[in-house]
Image (cartoon, rainbow, N blue to C red):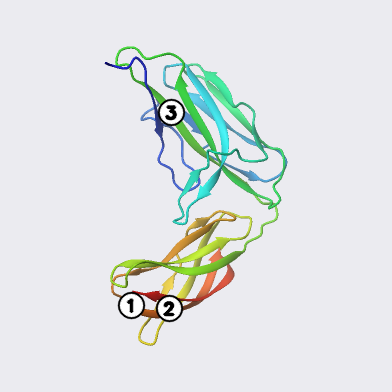
Amino acid sequence: MRPRHAATALALSMTAFGAVAALASGNSGISLTPPLLSHAAVAGSVGSMTVSNATGQTMKTTVAVHPWLQAANGLASPNQAVSLGGVRVSASSFTLAPGASKAIGVTLTKVPAQGSTYGNVDVVSLPTKKSSGSGVSFGYRLVGSLRLTPVHTRVAARVGSVVVSGTHKSGGLSLAITNTGNLLAASGGSVYVRSGRAGANASISGVNILPGATVDVPFLSLDGVLPAGRYSLSGSVLLAGRRVASARTSFTLR
């Protein structure tokens, strides 16, 4: 039996910490502009984002703000289980007629202790009426990015262990880096690995790391370039182009 109505959420592919614009080809669909809202983390209004409806249907729309979760591989995703503390939107639920737009004001009610906060603006739109004909209605989900950056920047990092993926014949080496500052910052730097028989210089990849997050940042691909054995690593780590820590540890290649 054909269902009378089904709402299908379509999600945009996201780069780390944001992506949006429109959720359909051409000029049809739901859009969110700007896709990235950036402002200094000061109490009060920090700007607005506009939701527009070009679907030809009346859409019930909700807006929520969540913090980002960053995995060890560097990928970020919205933490929909909680709201982003200290951030309020002017409208969290409303109806958009075809062709209509609504500006959503964003307010920072309290500056976080660390002086910054990073989150996503989650917009979900579903049609108010059941579909006729095919019985399928399309819903939309947009994920925008909110960056409230520190007035007083603190760039710092803690370096952990080497993470070995695979073997010396095939795999890779990463360095666990924790952003202990208050700025979303790209990693960098250089390291040298050596044993009694072999060694290699390598550059630390540029990966954006959220404040408080730990990411295993790649620095060397393994394709038989190093034999199995015990190695030491030394070097320096950069965040936002600044040298923030020394790297000194050891690891074993199988």
Q: The residue under label 1 is which amino acid type?
A: Leu
Pinpoint residue 222: horizontal percent, then vertical percent.
Answer: 33, 70
Can the viewer see residue 240 in this picture?
Answer: no
| Residue at the bottom extreme of this rendering | 196
Are discs 3 and 1 less than 8 Å apart at CB?
no
- Residue 6 drawn above or below residue 179: above
Quarter of the picture containing the C terminus is bottom left
Q: The residue under label 3 is which amino acid type?
A: Tyr
The residue singled out by tag 3 in the image is: 140
Pinpoint residue 173: horizontal percent, then vertical percent.
Answer: 40, 68
Answer with mark 3 or mark 1, whichever residue precedes in sequence.
Answer: 3
Looking at the rendered image, the disc whose residue lies closer to the viewer, 3 or 1, is: 1
The residue singled out by tag 2 in the image is: 193
Are discs 2 and 1 less than 8 Å apart at CB?
yes
Q: Secondary structure at mark 2?
A: strand
Label 3: how many Cα within 10 Å (few below 14, some 14–19, many 20+): many
**Label number found at residue 126:** none
Q: Secondary structure at mark 3?
A: strand
Residue that appears at 44% across and 56% down: 73
How far apart are the two marked residues, 2 and 1, measured between alpha carbons? 10 Å
Pinpoint residue 82: horizontal percent, then vertical percent.
Answer: 58, 39
Residue that appears at 33% across and 77% down: 226
The residue singled out by tag 1 in the image is: 226
